[in-house]
Every structure is written in C-alpha cells, then in structure tokens.
Amino acid sequence: MPEVRVRFAPSPTGYLHIGSARTALFNWLFARHEGGKFFLRIEDTDKERSKKEFLEEILNSLKWLGLDWDGELVYQSARTDYYRQMADRLIKEDKAYREPASPAGRDQAVRFRMPKTAKIVVEDMLHGNIEFDPAVTSLHEDLVIFKSDGSPTYNFAVVCDDAQMGITHVIRGDDHISNTPKQLPLYEALGFRKPIFCHIPLILGEDRSRMSKRHGATSLREYQTAGYLPEALVNYLAFLGWSPGNNQEVMSRQELVQKFDLHRVLKTGAIFNGVKLEWMNKQYLKTMTVPVLTDRLIPFLAAKGYGVPAQNRAWLEQVVKIYQARIGTLEQLGTLGSFFFEEEIEYASEAISELQKDGRLKEVFREYADLLQNLESFEPKIIEASSSEFMKKTGLSAKEFIHPCRAALTGKTVSPGFYDTVALLGKEKSVKQLRYAVDHLMTPPGPSQ
C-alpha cells in the first residue's frame, strides 16, 4: 500500500470553524495512525475575501491544537501558472474550450466538456457508492474551470493540487459530496489517479441543524479565549462522529492516534453539546498538577486585570487548589473567585438579599469582625474552631451564620469551603468586607427582633 498522504485545505476568509478543526483533526489522526503525511494547503484564490489575519489565526489555532503538518505550506495563489498549464492541456486535447471574449475585454472563461454519461458514481469510503444523474443535478452542463477574472475555480484547482501533491485520501465534510461528481471527470480527463474519498458528517447544533452562531461559539479562537484546554478539545472533537468502540471517553492524544479508524466514523451528523465539552475540559483540569494549572490560569486572570505578583505565587496556588474541582474552563476562576482578586468586591443582588434576611446578623457580624481581627493565627482550623465557639455563643446554627457571612465576605452566595475562603481572603480583607457589609448593606434589627 502506498504511503498515506492527506491534506487539510482551509480558506483564509474567516476564523477557523469548529467543524473545520474537526476535519483537520480527523485528517491528522488518520495520517499519524497510518504513519503517513499530513499536509496543509491554503486555498486563497479569492483575493478579495482572503485576509492575512485569518490565515495567521488558522495557523495559530492548528498549532494550539497540536496538529503539526508535514512539509511547507502550499498556497493556491502561487500556483495559477500550473492551473493554466493544465487548462491549456485540456483545451489542446479538445476536452475544454474558451468562451467567447466578453465586451469588457476580460479574460475568456474556460469550460470543461463534461462527459455525457447516464450517471456518475462516487465511491465513498464511508457512504459506499453514491450515484448522480447528470440530467437531474445539472452535471450535464460544461463546467467552468477558469473564470473570466483569470482565476481557477475551486473544483479545478482542488483536483490539480491533490493530484500533484500525491494525496491518497480526501477526508472532508459531507457538504462536499456534491462537488465530487464534478471533480471525478477532471481526474479522468487529466490522467490523474483519483484519491479515496471519505466524506465525514457535519457537526450539528442541538436542534440538528448545521452548527452556526445561533448555537453558540463556532470559531476555535472563541473556545481558546473561553479557557478550554487544547488536549480536551482534541479529545472532544475526535468523539464527534467517531467512536473507538468502547465506553472510554477520556483519551490522550497518543491513544487517539493509536485507535483512530476511519471505518468507525459515523454516517450521521454529530451533535455538538457545550455541556459535554465543558465536562470533558473539567476532567483534564482536575488531573493537572496545581503548579501547571496555575501557569495556565495566570494569563486568564491577567486578561481580567487580576495581576498576581510573583511573590504571591504560593497564595495563588492555594486559591487554584480549592477551585480545581469546581471550574470547567480556565476563564471561570476569575469569575467565580473574583472576590479574591478585586480591591472593591461587587455584591450580587442575591448576596445582598441573603444579608438582609435576618436583622440579628448586623450586630453579630460586627462582633465576628472583631473576633477575626484579634486572632493570632489565621489558619483555616483556627478560624473554624473560633467560629464554632462564636456560633454557640450567639445561638445561631451553621446555616444561619455561614450562608450570610459568605455573602458578606465574598459578594456571592456560593464559594469553596467557608473557612478556607476566609483564610485565603486574609485577615485584613475579611475584616474590611464584614465591616463594609455591616455599615452599608445590612438591615438593622426591627422592633420585634
């Protein structure tokens, strides 16, 4: 069997779509599993829409996912002379012809003489034989292979490129199935060996329609910005439309390469589930060492304006440790634990409501602030022991005391363990927030209290 050679061929007319990233991944996994080559071709013949910023984003996204490619990048925009040679060859052999010159004096478009056959059969690795009736699908019409602006059409350039690059397998979305019967006659006319085609199912939204912005984030950069790990995203995307045949869901990149089999790709559309992706990401976050996770989190905290001095690294790692099992993305720490980093804590409306439920707490919290102020050690166990004694003295249950006290200290109704939170906030900030809540947010006791 010849060496497997596959390609991913994005157009730099937009950011890398999550579906395109999955296509790139399937090509990469197949090539690495087979010990073959994975090439990257930039289809940039649309001069008006192709942008350098999109190209840079696509390349950076692929690198971020760890999808390394073999050889140099291939740019379609640099291959026009080759396409012209192939078109001239077809004209010379009377397999193509030039249209009459336009009045505007533009280049003459070139059309390929489509064979007048009863049907065109596409052999697909996943779907089997797919028959197309030219009379029904307009395949009887001669195909434009060079436009009047002097640029090759998509179907022509793709055939020329795949043949010259020695591509053995074309793995692409099944929205390209309709292009294949236009491309097969070109392979035959040019004497090129046709590749094996495998059209994989599209990624669908939860309503089973093609995934679009109305379903949420669609570009890979959005998931990167939201704090998803590349290793988790690779794992999740690999399972969108493919299964290793067992119940295992979390698989390393090495395991995916070892087990990937194109024959196990599903024929039906794969449903993208954001909740499942976050669950997957959480599994990877939970298994990281705290120092590594902290390194990953620092840029996301900085993006929110939460710079943490290097000398506070040990403190930051303790904060990360108590949130490790709680966060689903790297971005969430700065949101869920914002009170650790803000100078002025913002109070959520539900936290204020919690503070105003029991008028007795205003004076209780004033006394609790004094208690914390006078503690010699501010370790969680010392805080817990002192707080338990304090609750007994006031006659409040843990629920009556801790829930509103958490709201006073953090501005939120949910946080990690109460005593760990108090200890990491530190004495000065804890006392300050309690006194602020007492003076500005809490309701004084009524006449009946």
Image (cartoon, rainbow, N blue to C red):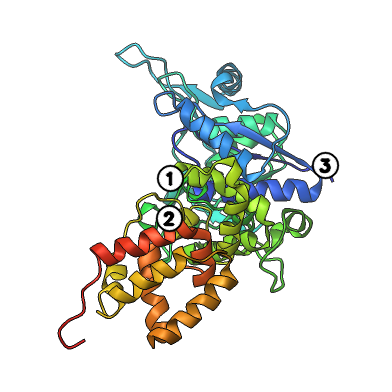
The answer to the question of whether label 3 and label 1 lie on touching residues, with beta carbons closer than 8 A, is no
Pick out the residue farthest to the top. Answer: 105
Quadrant assignment for the C terminus: bottom left
Amino acid type shown at disc 2 = Ser
List the residue tagged with mark 3. Answer: 2
**Observer-nearest residue: 333 or 239?**
333
Crowding at dot 3, Cα within 10 Å, few <14 / some 14-19 / many 20+, comes out as few
List the residue tagged with mark 2. Answer: 338
Res 385 → quadrant: bottom right
Q: Is residue 220 visible?
A: no
> First in sequence: mark 1 or mark 2?
1
Q: Nearer the viewer, mark 3 or mark 1?
A: 1
Res 37 → quadrant: top right
The answer to the question of whether label 1 and label 2 lie on touching residues, with beta carbons closer than 8 A, is yes
> First in sequence: mark 3 or mark 1?
3
Circle number at residue 280: none
Tag 3, which secondary structure? loop
Q: Which residue is at a point 53% across and 60% down the rendered structure image?
A: 424
- Above or below, 395 relative to 211: below
**Observer-nearest residue: 89 or 71?**
71
Amino acid type shown at disc 1 = Lys
Q: Which residue is at a point 45% across and 28% down the rendered structure image?
A: 50
**Observer-nearest residue: 222 or 49?**
222
**Residue 362 placement, left or right of 309:** left
Crowding at dot 2, Cα within 10 Å, few <14 / some 14-19 / many 20+, comes out as some
On the image, the x and y values in percent for residue 17 come to 49, 46
List the residue tagged with mark 1. Answer: 304
